[in-house]
Amino acid sequence: MRFPRPLRPAFATCPAPGHRWLRRAAWAALALLGGRAQAQDSTLTRLMHQHQYALTQSGAQLAGPGWEHLRQDIQTSQLVLVGEDHGTAQVPVFAAAVARELKPAVFVAEIDQYQAQDLSRLAAQPGLPTAFQRQHPMGLSFYSWAEEFELARTLRAQNAQFLGIDQVSLVATGSFFARLADKVKSKPAKAYLQQRAAAYQAQDRAAMVQGTNNFSIYQRPGALDSLRAIARPEGPEVRQMVEDFAASSAIYQLNKEGNPRSHQTRVDLMKRNLLQGRPAGQPLPKMLFKLGALHVARGMSLLGGVFDVGNLALNLADAHDQKSLHIFIIGKQGTQNGGFNPDDFSKNVKPYSNADAFDAAPFMAQAAGPAWQVFDLRPLRRALLGGKLKVSSQDLATTLIGYDYLVIVPETTASHNF
């Protein structure tokens, strides 16, 4: 798969097609686009080779000059953002190695806050959460995959706080209503919510098996009004949960209608959740982010002219005289998890190729052989902004400006179910 592209509907809002880039004065550097292809190729190739380093993986261990460069920068950063292409087994291994160097106090994940609570609880227990998964298929979103759950276990062992900043998951309505039923005091409300939880869980499971978009989070306004009426006599926690669910349902509905506001609304929600979730009035803690690559760029993202979570992280670090590090990790080819069928995992595994990805194609051409390739993009960014490098692709320019490192895994394997 290639960037920019829709995120999988299991976990996130799919950005509507047809977005146009917003041109901003702050992006005057993009006026450097164009120029002769020969000059572009020679300068770009020279700079890539000068700042390209090999990285080797052996189990959980990373080594080589590429890892040494990354490790030194990780150790001097307060915020480290890992931007991924979801669904490959190698990315959580990389993130776990980053966590061992960074020792984050907070782990920021692309799941909702309620899933983050479940994940933190389950990762602290021995064994795999197979019983939870049977009851709530894909109820932990990405962390329903074995490699991702092992990453969560590693972070939990480091006493990292889990911070989920996304909207309520598309596939988690059943577990959300079950949680809501546990919170209410009214017996009739509890019985109603438990009945709804079971019905929604069955509906969403059928949608996952059949590969349809008939998920229960798409709620009619009348159903949301009834839910608010149930919550009105309850405490503030229940009322807030209902508003969280209603806001998430609205985002998904906008996306289903192809409304471009869905993406911006979702990103704004993620940024608010990040600000509300970090300790207030305290020094900026060490934070590890693991989100889709679209979300972690400094400046404008690769989709829709949006200034995403990565730009907010950069601003937070700047405000505290700290450093943020933005890493884009992507596979060149192989297999990845492209679905969420809970009964037949083989239907979820898909082959892909990013060899001609328009935001990283020149780098992909240099990523041959078994070793991972690490590119330090900062010298290329300085050359671009200084007028010494011209590129013909706006997406490539956005990549150079948005990320500090690009890590390419030549061959990936798909994430696995438990």
Image: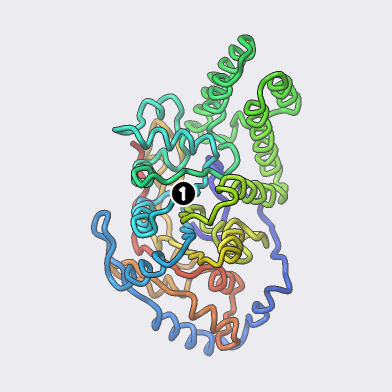
Position of 23 with respect to 336 (left or right) is: right
- Residue 64, how many percent across, how many down? 27, 70
Residue at 38% x, 51% y is: 92
Identify the amino acid type marked 1: Phe
Task: Reply above or below: 389 against 79.
Answer: below
Nearer the observer, 109 or 359: 109
Label 1 belongs to which residue? 107
Nearer the observer, 349 or 372: 372
Task: Reply above or below: 376 against 50.
Answer: above
Position of 324 with respect to 227 (left or right) is: left
Q: How is the image coloured?
A: rainbow
- Residue 406, how many percent across, how many down? 44, 68
Which quadrant would residue 187 be assigned to in this image?
A: top right
- Residue 201, how many percent across, how many down? 52, 24
- Residue 328, how many percent across, how many down? 47, 63
Determine crowd level at label 1: few under 14, some 14-19, many 20+ residues with C-alpha closer than 10 A: many
Position of 81 with respect to 103 (left or right) is: right
Identify the secondary structure beneath mark 1: strand
Is residue 302 in view from this perspective? no
Nearer the observer, 131 or 233: 233
Residue at 62% x, 57% y is: 308
Residue with the most extreme top position: 188
Q: How many numbered markers are drawn?
A: 1
